[in-house]
Each structure stands twice: as C-alpha cells, then as structure tokens.
Amino acid sequence: TLSGGQRQRVALARALVSRPALLALDEPLGALDALTRIDMQAMIERIRIEQGFTAILVTHDVGEAVALADRILVIEDGAVALDVDVDAPRPRRRGDPDLAALEGRILDQLLART
C-alpha cells in the first residue's frame, strides 16, 4: 500500500496530467508528517513554477500559507477577514526571519479576533 505522502504525490500527478491553468488544493497536506509535508510543499512550489499554473490552496496552517502563497485570504463567516500579500522571493527558505515575522503578524491578527 502507498504511504500518505505517496498517495498525495499520485493525487497531485493525476491533477496535473492535463496541465491545468488553475489547480484547487483543499488541505492537500493536512494528514502528512512534518518532514513529508515540507517536502510536498517544496514539490508543489517547484511544479507550480515549472508549469506556470495558478493554485488556490485551502489550509489551516499559517506557516504553510506563508511558504506557498503570494496572497493569503482569511475567510470568517463567509467574508474576507484578512487579506495579506506575501512579497517574498522564491524559492522560500524555511526559517527565513522575514517569513517568520509575517507568520507571526498573521497569527497575532487571527488570535486577536478570538
């Protein structure tokens, strides 16, 4: 049987075989362990750059959003509660202080709402 990471790679390959202009990803990495998740994030970013498609990623992981997104929208009660542009060069480096600061600011704003 396939591991979770292998299943996600197969699902991604299946979605990309038709070379879509837009790819919707709904919590694609949520069930993966931390290292596999980081590996898959890097793979998604690399393939997105190579193929030039637009991706819409739904995630509850702010770090993942900061690592992968050019724009982060937080939706609450069906409305955009937060809209943040991520102006950081690619490929993005784990542990980058600017990305960590952005993640912290987003988390602070989200936690202030609760």
Image (cartoon, grey):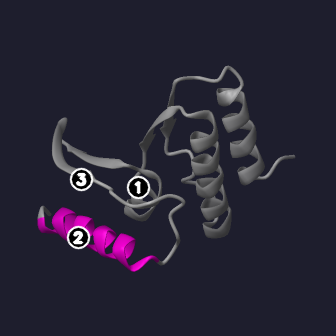
Q: Nearer the viewer, residue 26 or 65?
A: 65
Q: Which residue is mark 1?
A: 65
Residue 19 place in picture, x, y as percent: 64, 24
Whether the magenta-drawn stretch holds residue 2 is answered as no
Q: Which residue is mark 2?
A: 105
* Mark 1, other Cα within 10 Å: few <14 / some 14–19 / many ≥20: some
Q: Residue furthest front?
A: 89
Which three-letter amino acid code belongs to the residue tagged 1?
A: Ala
Vertically, is 14 above or below 57?
Answer: above
SS of the residue at dot 3?
Answer: strand
CA separation in Å, label 3 and label 2: 10 Å
- Residue in the picture at 61% in, 60% down: 37
Q: 65 left or right of 36?
A: left
Labelled pair 3, 1 in contact (Cβ < 8 Å): no
SS of the residue at dot 2?
Answer: helix
SS of the residue at dot 1?
Answer: helix
> Which callout, 3 or 1, points at the residue further toward the start of the chain?
1
Residue 82 place in picture, x, y as percent: 18, 51
Magenta span of residues? 96-112
The quadrant the C terminus occupies is bottom left
Residue 57 place in picture, x, y as percent: 44, 42
- Residue in the picture at 78% in, 52% down: 3
Q: 48 left or right of 36?
A: left
> Which callout, 2 or 1, points at the residue further toward the start of the chain?
1
Q: 99 left or right of 3?
A: left
* Mark 2, other Cα within 10 Å: few <14 / some 14–19 / many ≥20: few
Whether the magenta-drawn stretch holds residue 111 is answered as yes
Q: Nearer the viewer, residue 67 or 51?
A: 51
Q: Nearer the viewer, residue 99 or 35?
A: 99
